[in-house]
Image: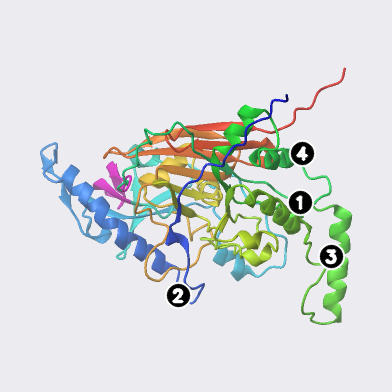
Amino acid sequence: MTNETPPFERQQTVYKTDPQFQLDSHSYQTQYVDIYFLRLAQLKPIVEAAGSERWDGMEIAGEGVRRVERVLDVRQGELCWVAGTVYMEMPLKPNVLEDISKDHFISAPPSRQKYRDFQKDEIMLEDESGRIRLIGTTITHETLVTGCVIAVMGTETASGEFEVVDIIFPELPPQPERPLPSSTTTNKRYIGLISGLSITGSLHESIETHLLVEYLLGETGGPADISKSSSISRLIIAGNSLADPHLHAPEDAVAAATTTASAARSKGKKYGYDAAAYNPKPTTTLDTLLSDLCTSISVTLMPGENDPANASLPQQKMHPTMFPQTKFYTGSTFIPSTNPCACEIDGVRFLGTGGQTIDDIFKYVDGDDRLDMMEKTLRWRHVAPTAPDTLWCYPFQEVDQFIVDTCPHIYFVGNQPEFGTRLAVGANDQVVRLITVPKFAETGELVLIDLDTLEPEVICFKSKSVAIA
């Protein structure tokens, strides 16, 4: 009599999409400056309420602190507080308008790892009336980027600068109550997080990708591995499912494609499919991978910087027709999503991005603690504060859709250098699990989130090379 492994049933969860980052239109006809006015109008009342609670009635050295409505109402020598939007004057920061106005047909300079220069950078506070420079150790040692809304308390100096004594952020928004784990079942419920698959379409796609698919389908490992895999109710792919074609295409293929495309252009305008300018293999390989997964597990697919979606944030869903095999699972086990992405799974609220937001903030700050940058975006109540200054986005007309009105329980960012996690705690008992999701193509790591405890764990599929003496 043979011992057969009992069948395992996939855990099911209720998934709800939040349409916060879905766009009704994709128009560039409005001015980008409207975004800052909308952002300030939405967040200024929050920081002003916190400022009134902390500073109203306060006295320093016998002088009372008073509130001023506008930046231009600040008076020299008077102790006061005011709210506005931060603007970082950074000489090393790229200026898109200057680049366009030069109109020089030369290669673009390589992107800088950091924009920060403590000797030359200036921190400004601005509103609809004007701007004022902020100085003092309180403000210079604080992590700030262009676009975050704050309130500052201090006094104007003889040189017309505002020396900051104290600072207030909007802080974490209200958080819905997380449902308690069911006492009638001991079954675990996991959500898988992955990013940076970087599918190339090569015949010899990475062994780690094949192992990942087999694991999620319950086709590898022992009974314990299969049991755990069956507890993963959903896989969220957080961007960059396809590889950057310029980095992974063979040089001879690129040269041949460039030559063919140039020849085609010299003959005149060409319509329709052009094999020289488009390589369908990566998308076809990804489609096969997704269709295999969707037969057993629910998949949420977010676009990333290298994926076939709009470049400006929020990136909209990749259309299901791009995936001929997977499209038949749309609405059931296949859910294309936006980037950023907001959703709710069994009452647990998720917020995540493909990584562009934190990668851009990284260039503004002195340091590389990306979990701290993530926590700061929550305390600023804004998932992409550097847009549109140095991060491409659409010009919003009615509301700034990047504002975080509801505090998530899980906040993840994809395509980061390494896995990391910590808890962010708010003043009103908000607790948020922060997670940086590494690039799978480089680390081979899948992150699992326990929906009951919000504790993460990492499963590594990376093959280790063995040195031969």
CB-based contact (under 8 Å), mark 4 and mark 1: no
Quadrant location, the N terminus: top right
Q: Residue at x 45, y 33 (%)?
A: 422
Front residue of 71 and 263? 263
Tell me the kind of residue under disc 1.
Answer: Thr
Quadrant for residue 260, please give it: bottom right
Looking at the rendered image, the disc whose residue lies closer to the viewer, 4 or 1, is 4
Which residue is the extreme one toward the top?
A: 469
Q: Are marks 2 and 4 in contact (CB under 8 Å)?
A: no
> Which residue appears at 63% of the width and 36% of the height?
445
Specify few, some or many for label 3: CA neighbours under 10 Å numbering under 14, 14-19, or 20 or more.
Answer: some
- Inspect the image, locate mark 3, and give the three-letter code of the amino acid beneath it: Thr
Q: Give how far apart the Cα atoms at labels 2 and 4 are.
A: 48 Å
The kind of residue on which mark 4 rests is Ile
Sequence-earlier tag: 3 or 4: 4
Q: CA distance from mark 2 to mark 1?
A: 38 Å
Residue underneath mark 1: 200
Per the image, the residue denoted by label 2 is 30
The image position of residue 150, as x and y in percent, is 32, 50
SS label for mark 2: loop
Mark carried by residue 258 = 3
- Dot 4 falls on a residue whose secondary structure is helix
The answer to whether residue 237 shows anywhere in this view is yes
Q: Nearer the viewer, residue 38 or 185?
A: 185
Work out whether mark 2 precedes mark 3 in sequence or the reverse, and give the earlier one.
2
Q: Dot 1, crowdedness within 10 Å: few (<14), some or many (≥20)?
A: many
